[in-house]
Image (cartoon, rainbow, N blue to C red):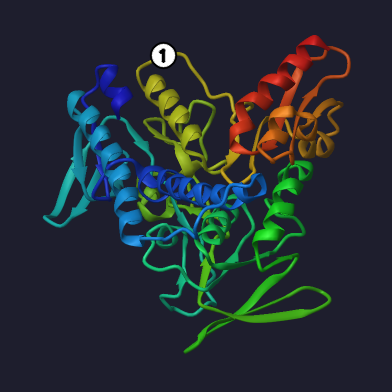
Amino acid sequence: AIRLAQLGFKTACVESRGSLGGTCLNVGCIPSKALLHVAKMIDDSKEAAVTGLYFNEPKLDLETMKNWKNKLISGLTSGLKGLADKRNVTVVQGFAYFISENSLRIESEDGESLLTFEQCIIAAGSEPATLAFLPNDPRIIDSTVALNLTEIPNNILIIGGGIIGLEMATIYSALGSEVSIVELTDTLMPGTDQDLVKPLEKLLESKCEEIFKGFEVTNGVAKKEGIEITFKNSESTHSGVYDMVLVTIGRVANGNLIDADKAGVEVSKNGIITVDHQMRTNVYNIFAIGDVVGEPMLAHKASHEAKVAAEVVAGISTALDTHCIPSVAYTDPEVAWVGLTENKCLRENISYEKGVFPWAASGRSITINRSEGLTKLLFEPVTKRLLGGGIVAHLYLRKKKLNICMKSYLQY
């Protein structure tokens, strides 16, 4: 909306939440990174003992922590509101449903209204996926609730070992919960090169109570003492009772919640709207961006898609290149990658060689007692053209490690 206004368009933005910023700012990236910062400070205080420096046991004030987190969010959402106001973007509070390819019905607390448009960009986002067979119980939560801390459970089961689940495991284990993780596939962070995941998994094994890989959750029962969850693989069945169960099995696009079919927009059963490389749907004047167009569901990818869509609306010749979208897991150690992965190279028979820098060989990593991890770059065997890169290491080393590996690559 802001980019369209910059380009001279009369722009309205319909938002169902009470504040701007979408999932990332309100219930995703920003609150999770704030709590991960708290987790890091707690972990650092414990790890200092190896150097002869000792701290008393941290004292948690959840109310102060939550207020601090919410203050960060409100500051950023207020900033966005200011930017929208400065560009004369009309913000409409409510939920939008398509009536036709040129009109929307807006439902709000004040009733219904009609909004007409010449061109439209759908940025309806996504919601946490659920397991329908689990009971309706407040002790079974999603990532949105998990970030709105009201209590720290004695033990918590995280269903789903992807990026969101592992970030939550990092937070809750640092805050004092006994954390267990159950993942359907045989690997944590499925799809990620496993040499990047292994250092993280090794550290998580020391922090978590149990990690079950290759197990399918089959049942859940609400009991007075907790939620009993049953999961199994081909060889065994396991069950446990947990104070809290966090479901992080992915997100579902919201394409089916806005009556897009009434505008002629094609939407898949799982809510994803198909777009071309200019973010245009099958309806010429309607575009879509962000989580609603599918993976990867990342805020920085959505922002760039928005820029492309706005500029195409304005008649600027531009398109989206998806080859260089970086992904990051803000766990400890952090994991990040960009470009081609080894998994994709192997799957698509792409020839590659790689250069690897182990952080056990770095003086800096040794001095902070965090020598786990590595940096790797993938390149074409003949031309040496850079294809992709991946990194896993402690936060302090992330910038340094990429610079070192890039220098080594350029010298090579």
- Say which quarter of the image contains residue 340: top right
- Say which quarter of the image contains residue 230: bottom right
Which residue is drawn at the image coordinates 74% and 34% (left, top)?
341
Q: What residue is pinned by disc 1?
A: 316
Which residue is drawn at the image coordinates 35% and 47% (left, top)?
26
Task: Mark yes or no: residue 102 visible.
Answer: no
Q: Position of residue 243 (x, y in %)?
A: 51, 77
On screen, residue 194 above or below 257: above
Q: Position of residue 173 (x, y in %)?
A: 56, 61
Quarter of the picture containing the C terminus is top right
Please state which of residues 218 and 140 is positioned toward the viewer in this rendering.
Answer: 140
Asked which secondary structure carries label 1, the reply is loop
Q: Position of residue 182 (x, y in %)?
A: 66, 66
Task: Mark yes or no: residue 157 visible.
Answer: yes
Locate residue 301 relative to residue 349 in the image: left or right: left
On screen, residue 2 above or below 384: below
Which residue is drawn at the image coordinates 82% and 14% (left, top)?
384
Which residue is drawn at the image coordinates 27% and 50% (left, top)?
16
Q: Residue furthest toward the bottom?
A: 224
On screen, residue 300 above or below 229: above
Please state which of residues 295 and 28 is positioned toward the viewer in this rendering.
Answer: 28
